[in-house]
Image: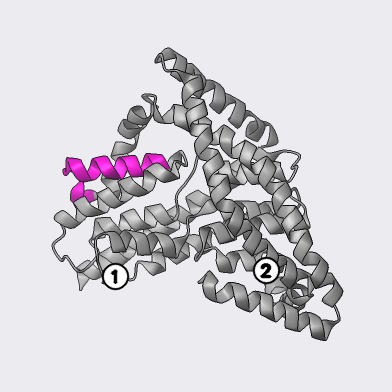
Amino acid sequence: MLNFLWPILIIISFLFSLINGSIENINNSIFESIDKVINITITLAGTMCLWCGLMEIVKNTSLINKLKRLLRPFLNWLFPEVKNDEEAMENISINTIANIFGLGNASTPAGIKAMESLQKINNDKKSLSNSMMTLIVLNTASIEIIPTTVIAIRSSLNSQNPTDIIVPLWISTIVGTLTGIIVTKLIIKRSKNK
Amino acid sequence: MTYFSSMIIPLFISVILFIGIKEKKNVFDLFIEGAKEGLKITLKLFPTLIGIFLAIYMLRSSGLIDFICKSISFITDFFNIPSEILPLALIKPFSGSGSIATATEIMANYGVDSTIGKIAAVIMGSSETTFYVIALYMGSVKIKNTRKIIIPALLADIASIITAIILFII
């Protein structure tokens, strides 16, 4: 995608600046952009270290197991077809919790393992099962308790209060996730009726 | 809301450390171990930031972004959408690091605490890279029939973007 879009954006900008008479601006902007990235990256590195460090502690406490039990009734409702398959449910739980804590490098492997165990019990191996659809939608719109990257970037830009956006972010993610789940359930219902 | 938002982080850190000590973990060692990971992530993001910033800075300084925003402003004004966030909404489903970089550029340009900056931050954080997740998960089990999974996934994206705009504009 970017292999195609990126060069086009730059070439079009250059051509437009010829028409628009802004060739001097565009020349300066090339070096300004590098300066800006370097400034942002320095602060970003610090904040990312802080959050990844804290999340490593979370990963090693019993917090994860406690949350797994807490989430189970909700996941049973989301995945009615596989709620008795312990292997699949275990991977789905780990995947969901890793998403909630923003542990990107832990959530993807668990998600893929969950897909594999769902494929084992899939009736039509060439088509997504209902549970697979739900799992994918859950992963495209994943809620994060502490949106670490957003906070890190906001503080690297000297925000007055980098955490200001947490509550709005929760709300917008919940609305997105619910929309995704409801539409998925509707698609599943329609294919059943056929 | 600001008071509550200010409390979340210190509370979260304290609770985690308390649980860590209670379970007799070497919390500082664990912290250092994880922090190294944070440095790696930043390093990985750096080249993408350079690439995307270059393209968007050039787009902006050539006057093309203003030109496009003005040309479609009759649509965006009608729905009360700030047209400044359009580049982000378009790149969001396709590229994760690209959308982080685009959101960062919008926050830097319009002010990180401005309405547009905050909307950009929420859009960036509210969902994963839709097409990437779908491709990865379907590819992992070699399934071709998508059963229109793209519809709920994209609708979820659109719903969270609209919510972000409503929350800050009204």
Which residue is at a point 22% across and 46% down the rendered structure image?
Answer: A88
The nearer-to-camera label among 1 and 2 is 2
Q: Which residues are magenta?
A: A80-98
- Tell me: B66 left or right of B137: right
Give x and y (percent) for residue A80. 22, 49
Find disc 1 in the rendering and name its residue: B147
Number of residues whose C-alpha sits closer than 10 Å to that of mark 1, classed few (under 14), some (14–19) or many (20 or more): some
| Residue at mark 1: chain | B
| Residue at mark 2: chain | B
- Tell me: A84 left or right of A90: left
- Tell me: A126 left or right of A13: left
Q: Examine the rendering and report whether any part of residue B115 can be seen.
A: no
Q: Amino acid at mark 2?
A: Ala
Which residue is at a point 52% across and 31% down the rendered structure image?
Answer: A53
In magenta segment, residue A119: no
Q: Which residue occupies the foreground of this view, B154 or A159?
A: A159
Give x and y (percent) for residue B167. 64, 52
Which image quadrant: the N terminus of chain B?
top right
Which residue is at a point 82% across and 66% down the rendered structure image?
Answer: A28
Please determine if labels 1 and 2 lie on a single subunit: yes
Number of residues whose C-alpha sits closer than 10 Å to that of mark 2, classed few (under 14), some (14–19) or many (20 or more): many
Q: Examine the rendering and report whether any part of residue A189 can be seen.
A: yes
Q: N-terminal of the two: label 1 or label 2?
A: 2
Give x and y (percent) for residue B60. 76, 69
CA separation, marks 1 and 2?
36 Å
Find disc 2 in the rendering and name its residue: B55
Question: Which picture quadrant has residue A179?
Answer: bottom left
Give x and y (percent) for residue B156. 46, 60
Q: Give the prevailing secondary structure in the magenta stretch.
A: helix
Q: Amino acid at mark 1?
A: Arg
Q: Secondary structure at mark 1?
A: loop
Which image quadrant: the C terminus of chain B?
bottom right
